[in-house]
Image (cartoon, rainbow, N blue to C red):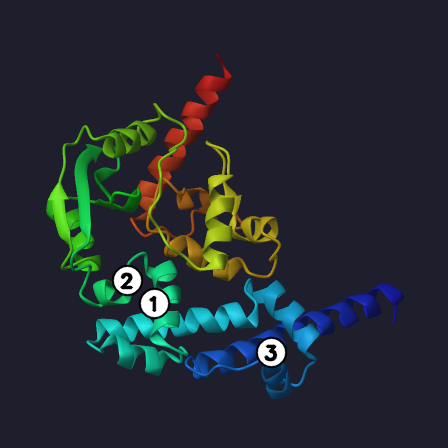
Amino acid sequence: MPVAANERRERGATIAAAEGLARRAREYLDQHPTTRITLEALARKVGASPSHLQRTFKRLVGLSPAEYSRMKRHQHFKSAMRNGRTVSEATYEAGFGSSSRAYENAVGALGMTPATYRKGGDGAEIQYAVTPSPVGRILVAWTARGLCSVKIGDSLNAVVAALRGEFPNAKLERASEVSPFAAAMLAHVTGERQEIDLPLDIRATAFQLRVWRALKAIPYGETRSYSEVAESIGAPRAARAVARACATNPVALAIPCHRVVRNDGSLGGYGFGLERKEVLLATEKRTAKERSAR
């Protein structure tokens, strides 16, 4: 057999082995979301050295095993709080060592205290404005710290209902359509303003933040594939994780997840509909071309 064919075969076997290792580790963590496990113990479970598991898992998943485990505990904690558990009960069920540790981690992940999140944002003060645009009604919501949510829909009722669904008990106050937040968003959608430089009040995992920073770096009028974004953050095998990070972006347009497409150039997904994504990209491409021609 030619040497090149042997090398390709060996390389393919190496990639398959790495993917199998990461998959086994991830499946174990998924099945034990509240179990605190050391890297050494996890490595024994999946039959690898700790250092090899650490490198392989981070390269393919985009997070270290410890970061992925913390993310699963956060998800379990949020679910328990939403289902009516007390802070103490949710803390115990999620595997946090203490309520203070749960608060420390959850505030960073949720953007509010656990008790407030469990109560659907009870006590949180959020202002919002809704403005018509070429892609439908845009709702822009913000706290005293910055932009916290963007919704796009067919009607006023639809976008307000979407915001209320996330924060059912928050104090929502409708502001003027000419608020700085709404004005900046409308100017961006119509092509009058290329970038949105607004303060943000969002929380995310370390991996989500890496992806969202990469999205902000995509030039106006251009697109990148999920694989290219994964490459840019040093996680070339994490294209699917990049897609999930795009799907969970709470401030569309401000973090331009619409600029990410499939490897073949097709649009891929978009939470507010592919027609809107197509309009946004066409507007940006046309505006960028017109400005470069001046």
Residue for point 59% across, 74% down: 22
> Would you say the residues marked 1 and 2 are in contact, meaning their CB atoms lie under 8 Å apart?
yes
User: Spatial distance from mark 3 to mark 2, Cα to Cα?
Assistant: 29 Å
Label at residue 113: 2
Query: Where does residue 282 sit, x and y in percent of width and height?
Result: 39, 33
234 on left or right of 189: right
Label at residue 39: 3
Residue 171 against residue 205 in the figure, above or below: above
Residue for point 25% across, 46% down: 151
Write down the quadrant of residue 253 in the picture.
top left
In this rendering, does residue 201 appear at all?
yes
Q: Secondary structure at mark 1?
A: helix
Query: Where does residue 171 sit, x and y in percent of width and height?
Result: 13, 51
Q: Amino acid under label 3?
A: Leu
In this rendering, does residue 265 appear at all?
no
Q: Secondary structure at mark 3?
A: helix
- N-terminal of the pair, mark 3 or mark 2, is 3
Where is mark 1, residue-wise?
103
Tally of marks? 3
Residue for point 18% across, 34% down: 131
